[in-house]
Amino acid sequence: MKVMKAVLFREHGGPEKLRYEELPVPKIGPQDVLVRVKACALNHLDLWVRQGSPAYAVPLPHVGGSDVSGTVEQTGAQVEGIAVGTQVFVSPGISCWNCEFCLAGRDNMCRTYNLLGAGRHGGYAEYVNVPFRNVLPIPENVTVEQAAAFPLVSVTASHMLFGLAELQTGETVLVMGAGSGVGMMAVQLAKLAGARVITTVGSDDKIPKAVILGADAVINHSKEKVSERVKLLTEGRGVDVVVEHIGPEVWDSCLESLSKGGRLITCGATTGGDVTLNLRSLYSRQLTVKGSYMGTRAELVKAAELMGQKRLVAVIDRTFPLQEARAAQELMASRKFFGKIVLVC
């Protein structure tokens, strides 16, 4: 039996539950691909799954990690068009490709939709087994680390801005948390679309980094009230779109920052799941609030094209060897980073 090194947890809890151990190399089915992992980027999802979120019930032991790049090691008997040795990145959303949503190009609405590293073993390992439809060639001029750092966050940000908010050229967007993965991508994508971009950071050292990404104005939320600064920057009008993934800690400020007819799109709940909503304010200001989860394969392919053209950049704060996954997750929990944290094998 061939074995591999992997980082796993055998019970839910804090980062101390992570273990660097040996596991059998996954066996592939006829429509699967075995990928030799070269890089795996962290997401907050990894922490939630490890902690034991009810939304992600996983059998134990479990290997996390949704964002993977590497080399095709083996292909199933029914796989065509994918050669062993090809450098690939993995689309983290796993769909059936048979239901009415998948056939309509809305694969993130699939009835059986799940995520690599949440619905099945992920990339905190030397090898990962995925359906062949989930591997895509790494674009030219993109490193394996960058290829792992962009898929989940870019497809999420793209779906929020364009699939749901229907962002238009000339509109003003508020992106919460430019230093996060989704924030990093949303700032760039909104700017590429011709929007005016306002974003937030938690410390002054992150301001120039957000400006380099394309932000027109950066608010340090630890020093200023975001909604008040937004009103100053927009001459009292507010913004057309808010991209939010933090939850209760910023919810009221996000709603207050919207203009009449504004759209708030949320994709996360880093600070909790319960918020309040004033219905009178909602309908009288004609606001729209939408929940967003991942994005479509078409949106991911477009993001990959932009990465290959160097028009979209995956900022990597730091890399860690696989065996130091605990330290990597502790850094993510501290929020003292900008961009993506990546494990390398």
Image: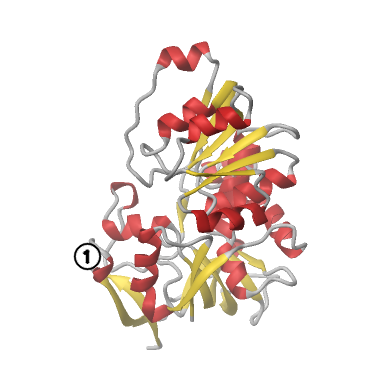
Q: In the rendering, at what x and y percent does residue 88 appear?
A: 63, 71
Q: Secondary structure at mark 1?
A: loop
Q: Residue at x 71, y 38 (%)?
A: 195
Colour scheme in the image? secondary structure
Which residue was labeled with disc 1?
11
Position above or below: 317 against 101: below
Q: Relative to 169, is 221 on the left or the right?
A: left
Quadrant of the drawing holding the N terminus: bottom left
Q: Identify residue type, mark 1.
A: Glu
Q: In the rendering, at what x and y percent does residue 340 appear?
A: 52, 63
Q: Is residue 85 visible?
A: yes
Q: Is residue 97 visible?
A: no
Q: Residue furthest bottom?
A: 1
In-front residue for pair 121/244: 244
In-front residue for pair 117/147: 147
Hey, which quadrant is residue 238 in on the image? Answer: top right
Q: Residue at x 38, y 81 (%)?
A: 323
In-front residue for pair 47/127: 47
Q: In the rendering, at what x and y percent does residue 12 appear?
A: 23, 61
